[in-house]
């Protein structure tokens, strides 16, 4: 699974935090809740066990993802003005209904895609239509809301 070096480091940091901080903390919470007595009606105990289950599941998930990750260095991609993995692309909407709106997206792997932070997956319809296109190209993207046209107005590599 492709991932940028930055995304890989973020996942490693999360895993380290879970193992070194959150796991020991929840174990301590469980021990404190056990000391309160009857476990069958102990809300603190059940909440701590649920939290522990979530943490352990996330640790397993991160271990798996990091084991399958293929770190792809980002940079200029070797071809100036071409959209490649890791690029940050600024698009101008040239569709009729919202002509001129600009949006900026970073093309990343599935593991680090986060639309809230404008990081879109390489496998998304938008990113797939942008890869290997050049600065100034107009691309047509089939989105769930319908067809949109975007002009590539900037391509950068900001880590």
Image: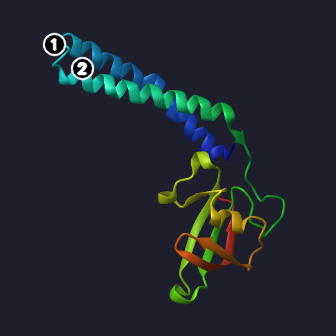
Residue under the point 37% across and 24% down: 52
Residue 41, quarter of picture:
top left
In the foreground, 5 or 124: 124
- Badge 1 element: loop
Say which residue label 2 marks.
Answer: 45
Pointers 2 and 1 in contact (C-beta within 8 Å): yes
In the foreground, 81 or 97: 97
- Looking at the rendering, in which quadrant would you find the N terminus? top right
- Badge 2 element: helix
Residue 27 % position (x, y): 35, 17
What separation in Å lies between label 2 and label 1 (alpha carbons)? Answer: 9 Å
In the foreground, 133 or 125: 125
Residue found at the far bottom of this picture: 96
Q: Determine whether 140 is above or below 97 in the image.
A: above
Say which residue label 1 marks.
Answer: 36
Residue under the point 24% across and 20% down: 45
Asked if residue 27 lies left or right of residue 17, the reply is: left
């Amino acid at each position: 699974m492709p991932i940028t070096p930055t995304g890989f480091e973020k996942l490693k940091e999360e895993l380290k935090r879970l193992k070194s901080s959150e796991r020991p903390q929840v174990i301590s919470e469980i021990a404190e809740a056990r000391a309160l007595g009857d476990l069958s009606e102990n809300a603190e105990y059940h909440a701590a066990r649920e939290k522990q289950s979530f943490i352990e599941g996330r640790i397993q998930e991160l271990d798996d993802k990091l084991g399958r990750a293929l770190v792809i260095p980002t940079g200029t991609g070797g071809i100036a003005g071409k959209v490649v993995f890791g690029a940050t692309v600024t698009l101008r909407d040239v569709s009729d209904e919202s002509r001129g709106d600009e949006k900026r997206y970073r093309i990343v792997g599935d593991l680090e895609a986060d639309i809230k932070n404008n990081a879109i997956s390489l496998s998304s319809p938008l990113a797939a239509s942008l890869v290997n296109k050049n600065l100034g190209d107009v691309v047509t993207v089939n989105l769930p809301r319908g067809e949109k046209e975007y002009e590539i107005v900037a391509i950068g590599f900001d880590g």
